[in-house]
């Protein structure tokens, strides 16, 4: 089972689009807080959903470095490979 | 050149529209004079206080006031130093012994605030390879403690023992100790955790457990020790953190534990070491308030009855109030605008409560956070319910009667 940044990024986008408030034209380079207008709490809550789908925990200190959807995907892939 | 203050533009805009919508800045209310534990003068008018943390009314305890006066007269008004240098007087040791004995624990550390107690304990206990496992709705002092700690920080879903278990299981095989942090009563919503289930998870996974009893101390349990006592799981709680600033009506924080290493924590805990200790009059008042609390268990019964009365009143009006009965009762509204109008109407009509706006609320909806006291009379509670009805109608948070 090898996830790639592309596959995880696609899954994250799919999850984001389930929220009607999220713009329809997002891609992996979108900044989660700036472009999607998520506040810090909304980001943490959204990451929890991604954690559950991917069966991985993303420590909060890692979140500080994450800006884009691709950053989040890369972080998840990295954690999966370590695990 | 970039302004140092441009980062506050968002706050300035939000505050501006808040004041415009309601006429007041909700974050700069002044209690001009406390009349009693339940009434204060605000804007020149007697106002019912339903937004304090003074659950037992002890901020106005005659015994505590006298003790503070005597201590100031004999010991002075401040220590001018840290607990590990010149800031420990015999009163500090006496309070630590008293708190530890009250909880039936080996030792206690007293901090200058409850915020610092969480900051200190969490950041010091969880080291580099360790994991902090926090409830998603944790208080800011718990989050800030986790930022000061070098440990990895993982959130679990609020009050969800299965989710806690799942996240701990994912860490199977990782080196490093795991410290779970939960609260006895969540300060914004009044939610109470399924502590027995969490203890079972802790046991199965070999984690440690810290419970912040800030709002549950003096409120829950036969002797007022909090949720751990009420649920009969005290032996499984490694660390209890709490504050004197709520049920005891003074200021200061503490941690009690049976782990003998608490003595070593004192020498590694920056929020304990690098700040001045509590002044003698506060320590003396806290000791006195603790005697009041120990001698008057009926205050807790009265508090429960009062909480049930306000809770039933809100639900009777059809307001979306907290499900569980606790002294913290939150009324959730759908829109921020509505919450601002309602909060202002409440104050116009003579009731002070706390206005909580997202993102400081758990689910992006605004809350009117109400708190009940043992010293509220039935008449005061009924009057507050009447005023809530009027304010909710004015804010269109309740449908006008047909
Ligand atoms: C859950 C919780 N923990 C800790 C604190 C901090 O206590 P203090 O205000 O005494 O510093 C508070 C209150 O502010 C709280 O609500």
Image (cartoon, coloured by chain):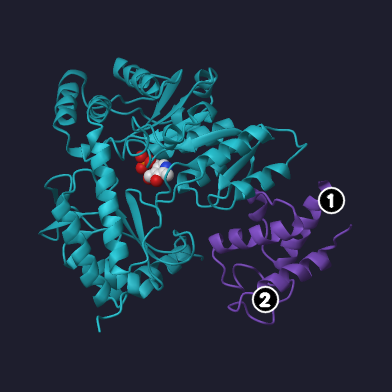
- The answer to whether residue B99 is above or below residue B249 is above
Whether residue B161 is visible:
yes
The colour one sees for chain A in the rendered image is: purple
Provide the residue designation for mark 1: A81
Which numbered disc flags the more N-terminal residue, 1 or 2?
A: 2
Q: Residue at x 36, y 23 (%)?
A: B102
In the image, are marks 1 and 2 on the same chain? Answer: yes
Image quadrant for the C terminus of chain B?
bottom left
Q: Residue at x 22, y 62 (%)?
A: B385
The colour one sees for chain B in the rendered image is: cyan
Q: Position of residue B399 (x, y in %)?
A: 30, 79
- The answer to whether residue B199 is above or below residue B400 is above
**Residue occupying the far top of the picture:** B90
Q: Specify few, some or many for label 1: CA neighbours under 10 Å numbering under 14, 14-19, or 20 or more.
A: few
Could you say whether the residue bearing mark 2 is in a helix, strand or loop?
Answer: helix
Q: Specify few, some or many for label 2: CA neighbours under 10 Å numbering under 14, 14-19, or 20 or more.
A: some
Along the horizontal axis of the image, is A44 left or right of B13?
right
Q: Chain of mark 1?
A: A
Q: Position of residue A41 (x, y in %)?
A: 54, 60
Residue B124: image quadrant is top right
- The answer to whether residue A61 is above or below residue B281 is below
Could you say whether the residue bearing mark 1 is in a helix, strand or loop?
Answer: helix
Q: Chain of mark 2?
A: A
Q: Position of residue A49 (x, y in %)?
A: 66, 61
Task: Find out if the beta carbon at label 2 lies less than 8 Å from the nearest ligand 1 atom.
Answer: no
Quadrant field for ligand 1: top left
Q: Are the residues at dot 1 and dot 2 in contact (C-beta closer than 8 Å)?
A: no
Provide the residue designation for mark 2: A17
Whether residue B150 is visible:
no
Nearest to the observer: residue B362 or residue B113: B362
């Amino acid at each position: 089972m090898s996830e790639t940044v592309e596959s995880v990024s696609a899954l994250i986008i799919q999850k984001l689009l389930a929220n009607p408030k999220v713009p329809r034209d997002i891609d992996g380079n979108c900044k989660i807080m700036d472009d999607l207008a998520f506040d810090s709490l909304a980001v943490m809550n959204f990451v929890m959903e991604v954690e559950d789908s991917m069966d991985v925990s993303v420590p909060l200190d890692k979140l500080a470095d994450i800006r884009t959807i691709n950053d989040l995907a890369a972080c998840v892939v990295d954690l999966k490979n370590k695990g | 050149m970039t302004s140092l203050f441009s980062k506050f533009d968002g706050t300035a805009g939000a505050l501006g529209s808040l004041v415009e919508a309601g006429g007041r800045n909700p974050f700069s209310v002044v209690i001009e004079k406390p009349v009693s534990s339940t009434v204060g003068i605000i804007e020149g008018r007697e106002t019912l206080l339903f937004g304090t943390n003074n659950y037992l009314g002890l901020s106005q305890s005659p015994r505590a006031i006298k003790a503070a006066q005597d201590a100031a007269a004999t010991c002075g008004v401040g220590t001018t130093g840290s607990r590990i240098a010149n800031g420990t007087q015999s009163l500090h040791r006496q309070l630590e012994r008293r708190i530890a004995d009250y909880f039936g624990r080996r030792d206690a550390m007293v901090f200058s605030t409850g915020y610092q107690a969480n900051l200190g304990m969490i950041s010091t206990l969880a080291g580099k390879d360790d994991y902090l496992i926090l409830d998603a709705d944790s208080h800011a002092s718990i989050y800030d403690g986790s930022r000061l700690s070098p440990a990895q920080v993982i959130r679990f879903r609020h009050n969800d023992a299965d989710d806690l278990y799942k996240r701990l299981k994912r860490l199977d095989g990782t080196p490093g100790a795991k410290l779970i942090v939960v609260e006895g009563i969540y300060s914004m919503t009044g939610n109470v955790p399924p502590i027995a289930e969490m203890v079972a998870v802790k046991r199965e996974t070999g984690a440690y457990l810290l419970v912040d009893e800030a709002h549950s101390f003096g409120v829950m349990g036969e002797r007022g020790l909090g949720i751990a006592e009420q649920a009969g799981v005290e032996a499984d709680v490694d660390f209890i953190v709490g504050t004197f600033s709520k049920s005891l009506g003074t200021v200061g924080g503490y941690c009690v534990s049976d782990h003998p290493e608490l003595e070593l924590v004192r020498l590694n805990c920056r929020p304990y070491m690098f700040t001045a200790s509590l002044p003698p009059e506060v320590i003396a008042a806290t000791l006195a308030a603790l005697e009041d609390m120990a001698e008057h268990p009926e205050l807790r019964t009265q508090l429960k009855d009062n909480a049930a009365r306000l809770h039933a009143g809100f639900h009777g009006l059809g307001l979306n109030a907290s499900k569980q009965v606790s002294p913290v009762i939150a009324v959730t509204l759908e829109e921020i605008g509505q919450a601002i109008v309602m909060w202002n109407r409440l104050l116009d009509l003579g009731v002070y409560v706390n206005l909580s706006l997202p993102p400081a609320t758990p689910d992006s909806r605004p809350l009117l956070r109400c708190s009940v006291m043992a010293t509220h009379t039935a008449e005061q509670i009924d009057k507050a319910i009447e005023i809530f009805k009027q304010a909710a109608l004015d804010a269109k948070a309740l449908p006008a009667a047909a």
